[in-house]
Image (spheres, helix red, strand yellow):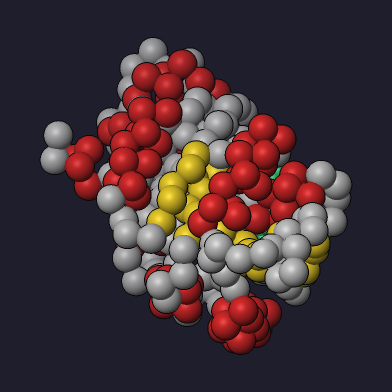
Amino acid sequence: MSIQWFPGHMHRARKEIAALMAKVDVVIEVLDARLPTFSENPMLRELRGTRPCLKLLNKSDLADPLVTMAWKEHFQREAGTVPLEVVATNARDARAIIALLPRMGPQRNLVMQPLVCLILGIPNVGKSTLMNTLVGRKVARAANQAAITTKKKRVHLNDEITLYDTPGVLWPKIEDEEASFMLAGSGAVRETAMDNTEVAARVGKYLLREYADLLRTRYKLDELPENEMGLLVEIGKKRGCLVKGGEVDLAKAAGILLNELRAGQIGRISLQKPPAWREG
Ligand SMILES: Nc1nc2c(ncn2[C@@H]2O[C@H](COP(=O)(O)OP(=O)(O)OP(=O)(O)O)[C@@H](O)[C@H]2O)c(=O)[nH]1
Ligand SMILES: [Mg+2]
C-alpha cells in the first residue's frame, strides 16, 4: 500500500509556505514523537533550506519514553536543528519553546523587527494545538482528524515574535511502505484515503512484535495470537464485533485497535525506532 493523498489545499499550502519562507527566521517543525522521521516531510526539509529548525517531538505523552529519548539523541546530531520533546497542550512546554526561539534566530532588535516563526508539519501532529497553547488562547481550530487547518494563519505572540500556523502537508506519494502504514496508523491520513483493516493488520503485526505485553493486558489475551489477523479476530471476539453466523467483523475490530492506539489506551507506544536502537 502506498498512500496517495494530496488534496488541493495541501498543494496550495506548499506553494504558500515556499513564498513565505523568504521572511521566516525560525522553522518550528512539529513531528510526531511516535514516528519522528516517518513524520518528517522531505518536501518541507527542502523548503526550509538552512534555516534554524526547532524539531518538536510532539505527543510525547503517547510515545514510549525510552524510545523518545533515543530519538532526541538522534536529532541532536543533526546540524542546525534543536530537538525538544513536548506535549502541545502543556503550558510549561510552551514557555520553554517561547524562551528558546529568540536564541535560535538572528540577533537583532526584535521589537523593531519581530522574529518570524513558521509552524510546519504533516497533518494531525498538533500544530494548531501548539499555536493555541503558545498564544494562551484559542486562535486556531484543532481537532482529532487529519486536514483540519486548510489556510495559513498569522498571530502576534508578543511584541517580539510573530507566528504562522500552516495546514498539514504530506507529499504526493509516500513510497516507503512501512512509513505509509505507520503514518496511517498514527492518524495522519484521512481514513477515506486508506484501507483501515489493512492498516490495523500491519500495525497489529508490529505491536505483536514490539509491545506484546501491552496487547495482552489491554485485550485480556491469555495467549498471544500467532499473527496479525488472529489479533484482529481476538479483539473482535472480546469486543462483540460479530456479524451473522458468528464471524468477526474485521473492519470493526480494526477500527477499535486503531482508535485505542491513537488515544493511548493500549499504552505508550512508539511506531518507529531510531536506527541506533535497532543496531543495539
Ligand atoms: N495526546 C496528545 N494529543 C495531542 C497533542 N497535541 C495535539 N494533540 C491532539 O491531536 C489532534 C490534532 O491536533 P491539531 O492541533 O488539530 O493538529 P494539526 O497538526 O493542526 O492538524 P492539521 O491542521 O490537520 O494539519 C487533536 O485532537 C489534539 O488534541 C499532544 O501533545 N498529545
Ligand atoms: Mg491545524
Determine the residue positioned at 72% across, 53% down: 131
Relative depth, front residue between 155 and 57: 155
- Image quadrant holding the N terminus, namely bottom left
Give x and y (percent) for residue 154. Answer: 77, 68
Give x and y (percent) for residue 265. Answer: 58, 27
What is the residue that sits farthest to the top in this orientation?
A: 222
Q: Is residue 213 left or right of residue 194?
A: left
Asked where in the image residue 73 lies, by quadrant, the reply is top left
Can you say whether 207 is above or below 7 in the image? above
Relative depth, front residue between 46 and 104: 104
- Image quadrant holding the C terminus, namely top left
Q: Is residue 262 left or right of residue 200?
A: right
Relative depth, front residue between 167 and 235: 167
Could you tell me if residue 21 is visible in this image? yes
Q: Is residue 163 left or right of residue 37?
A: right
Could you tell me if residue 90 is visible in this image? no
Relative depth, front residue between 170 and 97: 97
Asked where in the image residue 140 lies, by quadrant, the reply is bottom right
Determine the residue positioned at 48% across, 28% down: 268
Determine the residue positioned at 60% across, 55% down: 102
Determine the residue positioned at 75% across, 63% down: 111
